[in-house]
Amino acid sequence: MHGRKGRKGRNVRTSFRALAVVAALGLSAATPALARSAGEPATAKDSTSAGEPASAGAPGDIVSSEPRSFHPLPGQPTNTKAWKINYRSTTAKGEPNTVSGTVIVPQDGKKGPRPLITYAVGTVGVGDRCAPSAGFPKGTTMEANLIQQLTLRGWAVAVTDYEGLGTPGDHTYTVGRAEGQAMLDAARAAIRLPEAGQAGLSKDSPVGIMGYSQGGQASSWAAELHGSYAPDLNVKGTATGGVPGDLMKVAKFNDGSYGSGLVFMAAIGQNAAFPELKLDSYLNARGKDLVGKLKESCVIDGSIGGAFTKISDVTTKNPLEQPDWQQRLRESQVGTHAPDAPVYQYHVITDELIPYAVGKQVRDDWCAKGANVEWHTVPVGEHVSGVITQSPLAANWLAERFAGKSASGNCQ
């Protein structure tokens, strides 16, 4: 574990890492998540989810849309049009829900089948104000500069807010199946948006899946679910990095360290998706206070507020030692199902939040199942820098897939 050499040293490191997160996109560790195995298809059931009545709408159907603007930085112009959308998706339990997101399309005059990236951001927090769609008009959304690099290539981008982030209910932070389905349905919604269709999006558009950290979990789940959940999408490949494939190992690694605030954010997400886990029954007074604050927090204040706090400090009993929580964690394992399209996967060898061995295990599991994986070890850097340095390379790889070039994996 990191950062236990005295209070002063811990505070310095916490402040440094907090500034690094803010300055370099705010990506953070994924921690315990809950979902079914990726090989098991979800089914929509008649129910009420996220505060809205279920309807007969299919996953990916648009509930509402309105014009918005996309700014990577405050006031920075882009030659794009954007729409805030609410669209149908599916919870980790297979129930219909509504998720929000943003569709961004370059205004370059192209009319043919335009490539589409469905993009999952890294951790932004669990408060509704932290949703990517809330920050795009103001130029405050983390990773917006990376998204702009995609639109400059002439690609449309659909960015999910994830379940419960900007819509009623708590954000199901790091719930893998819900994330993957939200990504795939965001792509469906973008294709079904009439205004985007006028700018070249169609059912024939080649689709790329892209994400890092929490977004790496989401994009990996989307890759695994594509064949069973959204085979109608013309997915050409997935670029994913910093993947938290074994969530129990990631949680133990961060417990009591500078990433521990993210463990508690994930507990909120687990409880949101699976209220029968009864998170509140495990919390002591300090834990209830912390969780209450985290529900209103974005990544930077949440990370600082929970840093160096052990699970045992805020609970009367560790939920991660209980069979029902452990079962949900096992169900969320990444690597149980081979993606049906090629994958570009990368991980920083010195990643201080998501252990390198955890990401590499995903690669090994996919390769063992016959997936086409191009694996890259990033020899220099840390967690946040990984996506900054690798995003252009990942985009180049996706461009080759869009161009119809075959992918040469390196499993052997």
Image: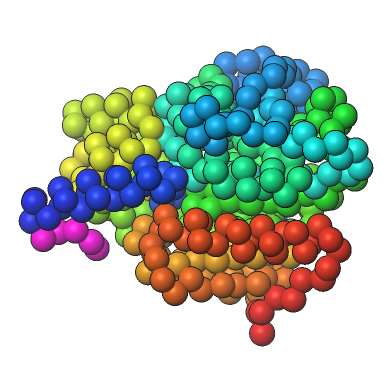
Quadrant placement of the C terminus: bottom right
Q: What color scheme is it? A: rainbow
Is 3 included in the stretch rendered in magenta? Answer: yes
Q: Residue 37: image x %, image y %?
A: 62, 53
Magenta part of the chain: 1-5
Residue 183 shows up from this direction: yes
Residue 323 shows up from this direction: no
Q: Residue 31: image x %, image y %?
A: 41, 49
Examine the rendered structure and indicate whether residue 235 appears above or below residue 185: below
Q: Residue at x 25, y 31 (%)?
A: 290
Left or right: residue 60 compared with residue 205? left
Left or right: residue 250 compared with residue 301? right
Q: Nearer the viewer, residue 142 or 273?
A: 142
Q: Residue at x 51, y 61 (%)?
A: 389
Left or right: residue 182 compared with residue 260? right
Q: Nearer the viewer, residue 214 or 77?
A: 77
Q: Nearer the viewer, residue 170 or 87?
A: 87
How many discs appear? 0
Q: Residue at x 44, y 74 (%)?
A: 379
Q: Residue 208: image x %, image y %?
A: 73, 52
Is 291 included in the stretch rendered in magenta? Answer: no
Examine the rendered structure and indicate whether residue 54 appears above or below residue 109: above
Image quarter of residue 301: top left
Q: Residue 333: image x %, image y %?
A: 54, 57
Quadrant placement of the N terminus: bottom left
Image quarter of residue 87: top right
Q: Main secondary structure of the magenta part?
A: loop
The residue at the far bottom in this view is 412
Left or right: residue 324 compared with residue 58? left
